[in-house]
Amino acid sequence: MIVFSGVVSDEIQRKTMKRRNKYFFCLSCIVVSAVIVLDGILFFILGGDMIEWLIFSAALIAAVLLQLFFARMELPFRWEYNIKIDSEKIVVESPIWPNPLQKPMKKIKKVLDAGDCYYIIYADINNCIVCQKNLIQEGTIEEFETLFPEKIVRQKA
């Protein structure tokens, strides 16, 4: 069994929030682009006013750009975790949640090695478990990596 326990450092929290903000911004850009294109097609097919379409498009683009200026870089609480990993599941306990979070190992999409931490990713970076390497209490990093033989992706420096 591998156990990570403790408070995640401020540096890793900021790095994680930056990754999540970048992901959300890219996703928002894709969705807004698709909405503008589809809306433009409908406006022109139905004989809509181009000014209305331009105003609507500008408002959507402004909303996406506001994410850059008002991106949340820190959370109002400390990331304190107790993460237990065995060959079948990952159990995450935190004082923030009333019940432990359990995730099956077989649903892990990838494990991103970011140098000082691992991101165990299930769907995307917004749905991940952060394992700070220096918070390992039981087991070793080598044992951790053997649990994810073909799913570890090393981040380029």
Image (spheres, rainbow, N blue to C red):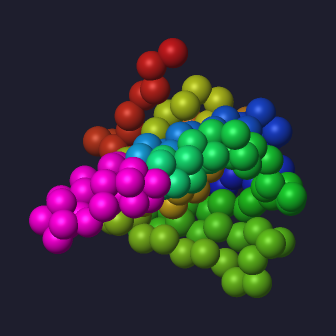
Q: Residue furthest bottom?
A: 98
Total marks drawn? 0
Q: Which image quarter: residue 107?
A: bottom left
The stretch in magenta equals 30-56
Camera sees residue 28: no
Residue at 54 percent across and 75 percent down: it is 102
- Where is residue 111 shown, x and y percent of the image? 43, 44
Apparent side of residue 24 relative to residue 4 in the rendered image (left or right): left
Apparent side of residue 108 relative to residue 64 in the rendered image (left or right): left
Q: Is residue 128 above or below residue 48?
A: above
For the residue pair 65 and 118, the one nearer the viewer reads as 65
- Where is residue 53 shown, x and y percent of the image? 36, 57
- Where is residue 95 shown, x and y percent of the image? 83, 72
Residue at 46 percent across and 39 percent down: it is 112
For the residue pair 138 and 84, the one nearer the viewer reads as 84
Apparent side of residue 53 relative to residue 128 in the rendered image (left or right): left
Quick check: is 47 in the magenta stretch?
yes
Q: Magenta-highlighted stretch: main secondary structure?
A: helix
Q: Which image quarter: residue 141?
A: top right
Camera sees residue 104: yes
Residue at 64 percent across and 67 percent down: it is 92
Quick check: is 124 in the magenta stretch?
no
Which image quadrant: the N terminus? bottom right
For the residue pair 46 and 112, the one nearer the viewer reads as 46
- Where is residue 139 shown, x and y percent of the image? 62, 46
Residue at 77 percent across and 33 percent down: it is 11
